[in-house]
């Protein structure tokens, strides 16, 4: 159930305006994947200081910062096209996704390592399993939904 609940919050974002609007979930996914991609790239290029070596030995502080910076830039761009929420709210959403998406990834890595499993499935070979592609949703989706529900003018 811990994997289902974040998807419920993720899909509920589309209904925050009382009618279906796919811009918020699409923006969420763009920010999540931007953060993941640029955290990986900047971590590989500049990474020297391990973030949480015991559970995710390849994650670095430099990667975290690179992912956050890229997500903020993409949030600014998204805000020009998806205008339901302001640039400020998109930037806050990008920070929530970047920080808690990374924490979600670390939690999932910790759970996998606690039961001596490397990948969360074999549907997507070479990617650590299906859940590894969406583990950022685990904490970020509920928190983004709550933030938007409480603080945005939707």
Image (cartoon, rainbow, N blue to C red):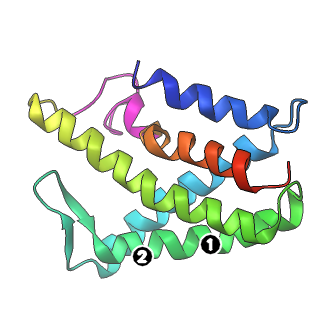
User: In this picture, is 139 found above or below 75?
Assistant: above
- Secondary-structure class at tag 1: helix
Proximity of marks 1 and 2: CB atoms separated by less than 8 Å: no
- Tell me where residue 22 appears, x and y as whole percent: 81, 38
Q: Residue furthest top?
A: 1
- Tell me where residue 44 appears, x and y as whole percent: 31, 71
Residue 126 counted in the magenta span? yes
Please tell me in which quadrant of the rendered image residue 12 appears.
Answer: top right
- Secondary-structure class at tag 2: helix
Mark carried by residue 89: none
- Residue to which mark 2 is pinned: 65
Q: Which residues are magenta?
A: 119-133
Locate residue 16 relative to residue 55 in the image: left or right: right
- Labels 1 and 2: the sequence-earlier one: 2
Count of marks placed on residues = 2
Locate residue 105 relative to residue 16 in the image: left or right: left
The span from disc 1 to disc 2 (Cα, nearest Å) is 11 Å
Residue at image position (52%, 31%) is: 6
Residue at image position (78%, 35%) is: 14
Please tell me in which quadrant of the rendered image residue 141 appears.
Answer: top right
User: In this picture, is 103 found above or below 47?
Assistant: above
Residue at image position (54%, 53%) is: 33
Residue 93 counted in the magenta span? no
Locate residue 13 relative to residue 136 in the image: left or right: right
Q: Residues within 10 Å of mark 1 (few under 14, many from 20)?
A: many
- Residue to which mark 1 is pinned: 72
Quarter of the figure with the N terminus: top left
Q: Residues within 10 Å of mark 2 (few under 14, many from 20)?
A: some
User: In this picture, is 88 found above or below 154?
Assistant: below
- Tell me where residue 54 appears, x and y as whole percent: 10, 55
- Tell me where residue 52 appears, x and y as whole percent: 18, 61
Residue at image position (10%, 34%) is: 114
């Amino acid at each position: 159930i811990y994997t289902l609940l974040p998807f419920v919050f993720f899909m509920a974002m589309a209904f925050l305006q009382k009618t279906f609007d796919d811009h918020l979930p699409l923006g969420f996914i763009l920010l999540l994947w931007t953060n993941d991609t640029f955290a990986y790239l900047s971590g590989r290029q500049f990474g020297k200081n391990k973030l949480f070596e015991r559970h995710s030995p390849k994650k670095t502080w430099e990667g975290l910062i690179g992912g956050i910076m890229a997500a903020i830039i993409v949030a600014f761009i998204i805000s020009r096209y998806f205008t339901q929420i302001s640039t400020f709210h998109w930037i806050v959403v990008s920070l929530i996704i970047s920080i808690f998406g990374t924490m979600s990834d670390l939690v999932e890595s910790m759970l996998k390592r606690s039961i001596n499993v490397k990948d969360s499935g074999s549907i997507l070979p070479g990617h650590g399993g299906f859940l590894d592609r969406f583990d950022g949703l685990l904490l970020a989706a509920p928190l983004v939904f709550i933030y938007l529900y409480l603080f945005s003018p939707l």
